[in-house]
Amino acid sequence: MNISNSARKILNDERLIEHRDMWIRRLTNLFNCTSDESSHEHVFSIDGVLGVPKEPMRIYENPELWVVESLENLATTAELTYNDYIFRPPCIESDVYGVHFIDSIFGSDVFFQDNQWYNRNLTNEVGDLEKPDLEKCEAWQVARRAALEFVRQDVKLPMYGMPTISSALNIAVNLYGEEILVAMLIEPERAFHDLQIINDVLCEIHNWYLKALPEQQLQPVISWERTQPPGYGQICGCTTQLVSGEIYKDLIAPLDAQLLSQYPGGGMIHLCGAHEHILPMLRDMKQLKAVQINDRATVDLDKYYSLLRKDQIIYLIPCEQMSVEQAMEITGGNRLVVLGSQSSVIGKCCSSCGH
């Protein structure tokens, strides 16, 4: 099944593609630290446009139809991506099993309840994890079919967001709960065995996407906000607040660096809790080019801004404890990307005042 001719025309519109690429060039300049700080290009705002089908759960029964319906939906709002103040990347995203996509691949029981996905812990001991056969994993087959259908539809405007591939520590905590945290303290070799197996699978999946999809259109999870230049990946660091700085440095940081190394430009880490104790390791991770913070993590924006490298970009979702105005006071707009609906306010301001 193909998308309609009218949708295909919109999603291959050269004017919209060039406008998207103009914003990508500006974002690339920011990542390369070549933005002119006397212009509004030294602060950035992103609030993308996401195409979703009427029945999002359709992806599990018919991934190909899900792609068609998502693209058709995106075509109806694609004109919204043409904006002079903020970057509005056009995206669809294959959100298979939410943050439990990889858990399912490792054999965890994943189920839907109260409008979100959950998983049950594995029953094996930490240290006994085995690498799954991806060819036999239903979740991977669904995700792969959706990605290949997107490529087959041959539309150049949309970006394609991957499922949540996450990070070795996040997945290990999903699979084992507190048992992996205890094991890292008393049986670090067994814990690292499982963490390395998880990370190897994550790297394998990332590399499949890198080969299967056009680099210009491939984005990690939350593609419509955490948009990066082509060739950058992402890890989820939510659970790093549960481990000490020493454990992160010895057991987790090498795995995060390995995963980001799969991408030509390195990439981003997502943080949403109390993570300031790992900032020295994040600063020293050469593959880490951006940090995305929201909720509790935004409270420490001043620490992120002062302690990270000058070439590391901060993606910020404002909240009650850290408004756009406060963020601008701390950063002066430098190395700052504001995400979500409030980005329109800062975008319009920065186009006229340079902040």
Image (cartoon, grey):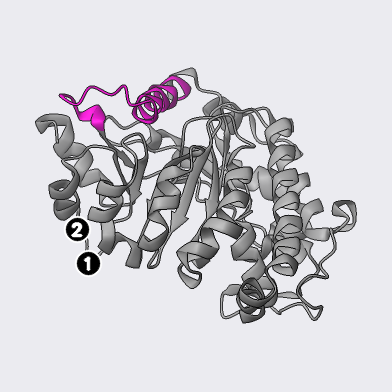
Q: Which percent across, then down, holds residue 151?
A: 71, 32
Q: Which percent across, then down, holds residue 250?
A: 57, 58
In the image, residue 214 above or below residue 272: above
Hey, which quadrant is residue 318 in on the image?
Answer: bottom left
**Pointer 1 residue:** 320
Q: Which percent across, then down, holds residue 243?
A: 51, 69
Towards the viewer: 295 or 222: 295
Label 2 Cα crowd, 10 Å radius (few <14 / some 14-19 / many 20+): some
Dot 2: what SS? loop
Dot 1: what SS? loop
Q: Are marks 1 and 2 in contact (CB under 8 Å)?
A: yes
Towards the viewer: 52 or 230: 230
Q: Which residue is found at the position 50% from the left and 63% from the top? A: 246
Q: Which mark is residue 323?
A: 2
Q: Is residue 258 left or right of residue 11?
A: right
In the image, the segment drawn in magenta is 17-42
Hey, which quadrant is residue 290 in on the image?
Answer: top left
Furthest-left residue in this view: 353
- The tally of labels here is 2
Towards the viewer: 217 or 286: 286
Q: Is residue 164 left or right of residue 304?
A: right
Q: Which residue is found at the position 70% from the left and 45% from the top? A: 203
Q: What's the amino acid at mark 2?
A: Ser
Quadrant (top left, top right, bottom left, bottom right) of the C terminus:
top left
Q: Main secondary structure of the magenta part?
A: helix
Q: Is residue 87 magenta?
A: no
Q: Which percent across, then down, holds residue 77?
A: 44, 41
Q: Is residue 33 magenta?
A: yes
Towards the viewer: 331 or 43: 331
Q: Which residue is found at the position 71% from the left and 79% from the top? A: 121
Q: What's the amino acid at mark 1?
A: Glu
